[in-house]
Amino acid sequence: MAEPEIALVFSPETWVEELHRFVTDHGGARVRSVVVDPAVALDELFGTLVVSSRWPALTHGLVDELHARGRTVLGVYDREEPATVDVLRATGVDATVESDAPMSEFLAVLNELEPRDDVRGRGDDPAASAGHGSYDCRWIAVGGPAGGGATEVAIELARAARGSTVLVDADDVAPAVAARLALPIEPNLRDAIDAVEHDLGAIEHTLIAVPALGGAVLTGLANVAAWSQVRAPEALRTLRALCRMHATVVVDTAPCLEDLPTAPRGRHAVTRAIVAESAHLVAVGDATPVGVVRLLGWIADALALRATGSVHVVLSRAPRDAHRRAQLEAEVLRTFVPETVTCVPFDPRVERAAWSGTPVASGPFRRALAPLAVALADVDSSFSAVAIS
């Protein structure tokens, strides 16, 4: 029988170093990686994740995703903290072992967890890695430079979508959907993540029904300082959970794509992850020469994160002059060829809707975006949309 291939979650507990040293010197298992960031636990190839009960990233959602990729989880607890066994089992781990157990017991449990060769290596499945295959959902990311109007486009896409719809505010820089639609800030995204990751309530109870949208809204973080409380994998698993329940999920997130490795979690990691996993991208920017330059730079950064997927461009507050609109479209097409280019004219109804806290009333704004909504729905009759503003 082949040796189990494991990933060790790094912690200062003595059993971690002892297990690593034992299998290095005596065999019985192979350590494929030492995990610090929970995202690595999803990217690396191994059969079993060995993790302490004290690791804060160990959640029900993470264990479910590891199981979906054909992996198992061994939870390690302290004999002096027997209650942590129940905590581990609540997350769905496959087995538990005491931290002071002999290394032979660790290996015995690992061999029981991974008796089949076909368990190892499933992590190289691109569909499982991206989340599309396992969760049967397609995301459409709507984004662009700050101030381009992507939030309004996201709200309109949610209103125009077919079937059951959810609008999610995942903007960790300037959450605005609650204020824009005159909604309470609780329950919010953090509550939805707790429901998915820790089984603290039901995710449907975190949604606020908005009849004017024909669907529901999941509001954003109560304050910007809470950005460090959200991990990108948690946010993605929450979106996937919503995708399984609703035909369309529209998510409004931050416009920033810079990779800023701020400890303990990278700033803008949530936005980058959503863009990277989107099936289609709708890029929104101001219909001015400077706005187009900024939009094209944003698109270049977004495409660097994505292996595949189409791109749709929306130029907001476009001038009435047809010649000027044609110049802006030509500048976009000179750089790359998107699936569609949509010019959305200035519409005073947008400003009036912002004051009243309602979706935009019927007029030029909605008429301009109607063909795009139809095109996106035709790509997949049950699409999920992700908006970044």
Image (cartoon, grey):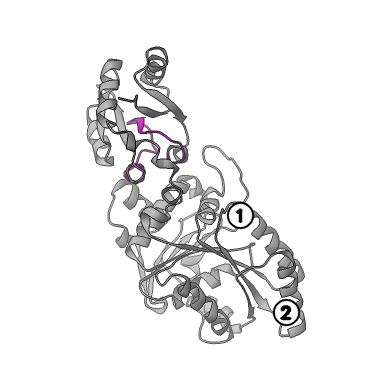
Q: Earlier in the sequence, mark 2 or mark 1?
A: 1
Residue 146: quadrant of the picture: bottom right
Whether 64 is among the magenta residues is yes
Q: Which residues are magenta?
A: 42-66
Q: Quadrant of the N terminus?
A: top left
Callout 2 touching callout 1 (CB < 8 Å)? no
Residue 10 seen in the figure: no
- Residue in the picture at 39% in, 41% down: 122
Residue highlighted by disc 1: 256
User: Which element type, helix, strand or loop, lies under badge 1?
Assistant: loop
Question: Looking at the picture, does residue 373 appear above or below residue 236?
Answer: below
Q: Nearer the viewer, residue 262 or 38?
A: 38
- Residue in the picture at 25% in, 40% down: 90
Q: Nearer the viewer, mark 2 or mark 1?
A: 2
Residue 144 on image: x %, y %: 62, 63
User: Which element type, helix, strand or loop, lies under badge 2?
Assistant: helix
Residue 366 seen in the figure: yes
Kind of residue at disc 1 = Cys
Residue highlighted by disc 2: 325
Number of labels in the image equals 2
Whether 178 is among the magenta residues is no
Q: Nearer the viewer, residue 210 or 101?
A: 101
Q: How far apart are the alpha carbons under marks 2 and 1?
A: 26 Å
- Residue in the picture at 25% in, 32% down: 95
